[in-house]
Amino acid sequence: MPVPNKTVENKVDTITAAWESLRPGKTFAGMTLEQFKLRVKPSIDARAIISDCEHKLTSALNTRDDADKISNEACLLVVNSVKGDPAEGEDGELYEAMGYVRKSERKSGLKRARLKAA
């Protein structure tokens, strides 16, 4: 069964800290403290890369969200302009091609409830 990533990270940190503070000169499992650090370094480096990528992703997502607000406003301005244009309007093919429903194709929305016969 795989060990959760946080558990491995916590184990490495705890073991390294204890070894450094209590028995820095002693050898365990045929490794010195420096050899142990070299052996776990790829795991620590990979976590640093992942953390950096997560920060970059968060920044990129925030930049995208801010840009999307401006893009949405621009889209609304264009669509409203098309609706207000006498040659195009809400019933034109351009309005429909932009992903909207033509005014003449809209349903009224009125629904009458049917009465059940007793």
Image (spheres, grey):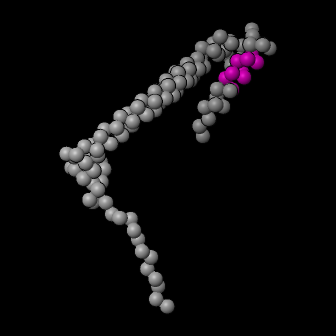
Q: Position of residue 21 (x, y in %)?
A: 78, 13
Q: Is residue 2 magenta?
A: no
- Judge whether 26 appears above or below 5 on screen: above
Position of 57 with respect to 5 (left or right) is: left
| Residue that lies at the very extreme toward the right in this rendered image | 22
In the picture, measured across the screen, residue 37 lies left or right of residue 25, that is left
Q: Residue furthest front?
A: 86
Q: Main secondary structure of the magenta part?
A: helix
Question: Who is closer to the viewer here, 94 or 40?
Answer: 94
Residue, x 44% and y 76% (percent of image)? Answer: 113
- Identified at 43% across, 80% down, the residue is 114
User: Which one is in front, 13 or 29?
Assistant: 13
Tell me: 106 left or right of 62.
left
In percent of width and height, residue 80 lies at 32, 42
Q: Picture coordinates of residue 10 (x, y %)? A: 68, 27
Query: Would residue 26 be visible to someone looking at this image?
Result: no
Residue 15 placement: quadrant: top right
Q: Where is the N terminus found, in terms of image quarters? A: top right
Compared to 1, does 35 lie above or below? above
Furthest toward the top, the residue is: 25
Closer-to-camera residue (13/84): 84
Region rendered in magenta: 11-19
Q: Nearer the viewer, residue 112 or 7?
A: 112
Q: Is residue 110 left or right of residue 26?
A: left
Q: Residue at x 73, y 17 (%)?
A: 17
Residue at the image position 31 percent from the left and 38 percent from the top: 78
Q: Is residue 32 placed above or below 75 in the rendered structure?
A: above
Number of numbered markers:
0
